[in-house]
């Protein structure tokens, strides 16, 4: 149960960080108030202070306490964000484990070249032939549209048996596997930057609009796909596209794969299925990135 364990670790570490920040805040506040009390008791006696002097004294006492607890609040918020990011990473790793596709670090180019040179010449020729002729590999059975929709929403956890089985089935289909892995990469990168698909609530476009888009229509006829009204979200995604080369490449790859998938399954999905596909986590990511890149927007391209 890697996903559950990861979530528990994230929750525990996040709670510990929040408690530690609160403890430090209480200690600093107590120390400051103790210093103020000592100064007040041991300070020299004098004439009664004016109203302005009393006000400045009160500000001098209260302001450090306010700054301490502002810092505590910021530290607790950062701890929450780190716990959420850890939980999401655990969920992604669990999905990879369920699919039997655990990530393997790619070797550097020099290592790959060295291994290729060390293989016998016959093995190299065979691998080259397989790469050039993919039809030599038998195709896996195609995934059903219903399984694809469930897989593109990704499992909510180890208890989401239906989505896990759909994901396993979808990953046996090469076309479906490509779009699922592209979606997984993009959703993970978005979450790492504080953009969570569960938080998006785009206005749903009618199924016939999605069908027109799948058929290649662009411009005002499919403007209803631009359903995210939060300009800050669009601006955040646009900033990632412009400032992060890794994210930009992953996003454009995902947009291409999702577009191809949509064209492939549009005729097999009824209106309810098309609406469900658009409301998956992958569908929401597509709408967000389509708006950010200008593929879908309110004006004609």
Image (cartoon, helix red, strand yellow):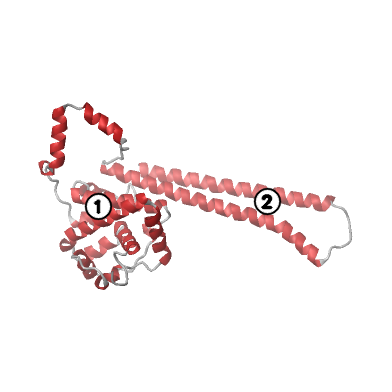
Percent from the top left, x then y, of residue 31?
71, 47
Residue assigned mark 1: 179
Instruction: Please tell me which residue is depicted at 20% across the width and 57% down the height of the picture.
Output: 260
Choose the circle earlier in sequence order: 2 or 1.
2
Quadrant of the rendering where the C terminus is positioned: bottom left
Badge 2: residue crowd in 10 Å (few <14, some 14–19, many ≥20): some
Q: Is residue 68 above or below residue 135?
A: below
Position of 234 compared to 276: left or right?
right
Q: Residue at image x 89%, y 61%?
A: 47
Dot 1: few (<14), some (14–19), or many (≥20) neighbours within 10 Å? Answer: many
Residue 125 appears in the figure: yes
The image quadrant where one finds the N terminus is top left
Q: Nearer the viewer, residue 276 or 226?
A: 226
Name which quarter of the figure residue 290 lies in.
bottom left
Query: Residue at image x 80%, y 63%?
Result: 53
- Helix, strand or loop at disc 1? helix
195 lies left or right of 169: right
* Along the viewing direction, whichever of 51 and 21 lies nearer the viewer: 51
User: Which residue is denoted by mark 2 in the rendering?
Assistant: 29
Point out residue 211 in the picture as x, y percentages from the top left corner: 20, 67
Can the viewer see residue 155?
Answer: no
Q: Is residue 8 left or right of residue 43?
A: left
Q: Closer to the camera: disc 2 or disc 1? A: 1
- Tell me if 24 is positioned left or right of 224 in this view: right
């Amino acid at each position: 149960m890697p996903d559950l364990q990861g979530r528990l670790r994230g929750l525990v570490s996040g709670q510990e960080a929040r408690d530690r920040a609160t403890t430090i805040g209480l200690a600093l506040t107590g120390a400051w108030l103790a210093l103020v009390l000592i100064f007040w008791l041991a300070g020299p006696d004098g004439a009664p202070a004016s109203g302005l002097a009393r006000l400045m004294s009160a500000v001098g006492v209260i302001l450090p306490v306010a700054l301490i607890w502002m810092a505590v609040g910021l530290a607790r918020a950062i701890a929450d964000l780190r716990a959420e990011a850890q939980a999401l990473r655990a969920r992604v790793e669990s999905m990879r484990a369920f699919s039997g596709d655990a990530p393997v670090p790619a070797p550097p180019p020099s290592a790959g070249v060295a291994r290729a040179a060390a293989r016998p010449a016959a093995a190299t020729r065979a691998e080259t032939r397989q790469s050039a002729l993919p039809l030599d590999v038998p195709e896996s059975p195609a995934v059903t549209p219903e399984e694809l929709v469930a897989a593109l929403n990704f499992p909510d956890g180890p208890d989401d048996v239906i989505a896990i089985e759909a994901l396993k089935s979808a990953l046996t289909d090469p076309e479906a596997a490509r779009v699922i892995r592209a979606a997984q990469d993009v959703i993970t990168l978005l979450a790492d930057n504080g953009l969570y698909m569960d938080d998006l609530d785009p206005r749903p476009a009618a199924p016939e609009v999605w069908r027109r888009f799948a058929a290649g229509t662009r411009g005002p006829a499919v403007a209803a796909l631009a359903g995210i009204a939060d300009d800050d979200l669009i601006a955040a995604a646009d900033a990632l596209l412009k400032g992060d080369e890794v994210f930009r490449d992953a996003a454009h790859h995902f947009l291409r794969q999702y577009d191809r998938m949509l064209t492939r399954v549009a005729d097999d999905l009824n209106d309810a299925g098309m609406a469900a596909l658009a409301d998956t986590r992958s569908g929401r990511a597509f709408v967000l990135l389509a708006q950010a890149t200008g593929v879908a927007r309110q004006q004609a391209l």
